[in-house]
Amino acid sequence: MADNVWEVHGHEFVNCNCNYGCPCQFNALPTDGTCTGVGAIHIESGFHGNVRLDGLNVVWLLHWPNPIHLGNGVTQAVIDERANDEQREALSRILYGFDTEMGATHWQVFSTTMTTTLPALFMPVDFEVDVESRQAKLKVPGLIDALGTPIRNPVTGEEHRVRIDLPNGFEYSLAEMGSGSSTVTGDIPMELKDSYGQFADIHLSNVGIIKEMAA
């Protein structure tokens, strides 16, 4: 198998600073003019060339001082410390947008907007996510503490379910909307409270979403 061919199949949680729904999903400007977010995937199965990636967790941290398309971003990957050297290299290349067709994934698109790409960190990543119920917990000791929950009706307190369907997306085809709160320290600090939460099943490759699996 070619060294630059890869696939990732798993479950994702993303929390950013925008209001529920995230204007980026609608080609609109971010809620406060900036974008800061944290995302994580539990990889059920995956590979990069001949390197298997099954069972590993990965995180990406992102910040732009303006709308994403204007650039000047900073990013850093956090990779499960259980990964061996080959897996660490493979996941770094995927998360930093290498070995991917132009515009095929969010990681590749984001990479073109970065002024600063910080070296990947290799740390314990404790991550649980249930896409259907819009629940997630993400903890990287000393760096990240994040929680995903359903959106709740402000009057009744009942769970409110909303989904976004992106037939031509570059990250997911269908995502559950929820609420997220995250505290992140380190080089890309953030303090997010009851803001945009995204839960999705992910089927990505070096050429984009694997449509037959994402349907």
Image (tube, rainbow, N blue to C red):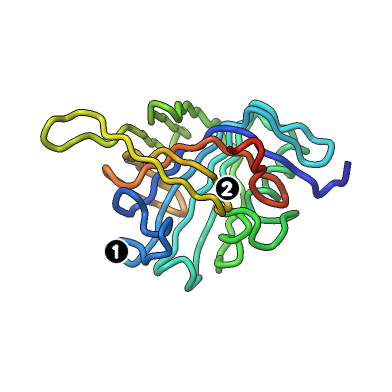
The percent coordinates of residue 78 (x first, y second) are 56, 42
Give the residue type that dot 2 points to.
Ala
In the image, taking residue 129 as reference, residue 20 lies left or right, namely left
In the image, taking residue 92 as reference, residue 73 lies left or right, namely left
The percent coordinates of residue 148 (x first, y second) are 36, 34
Q: Residue at x 62, y 53 (%)?
A: 105
Q: Quadrant of the N terminus?
A: top right
Which one is in front in this view, the residue at disc 1 or the one at disc 2? 1
Give the residue type that dot 1 points to.
Asp
At label 2, counting other C-alpha atoms closer than 10 Å, the crowd grade (few under 14, some 14-19, many 20 or more) is many
Name which quarter of the figure residue 159 lies in. Answer: top left
Q: Secondary structure at mark 1?
A: loop
Q: Residue furthest right?
A: 1
Q: Which residue does the numbered mark 2 point to in the structure image?
A: 77
Q: Secondary structure at mark 2?
A: strand
Instruction: Say which mark, if any, is on residue 32.
Output: 1
At label 1, counting other C-alpha atoms closer than 10 Å, the crowd grade (few under 14, some 14-19, many 20 or more) is few
In the image, taking residue 97 as reference, residue 85 lies left or right, namely right
Above or below for 56 versus 7:
above
Q: Quadrant of the C terminus?
A: top right
Label 1 or label 2, whichever comes before in sequence order: 1
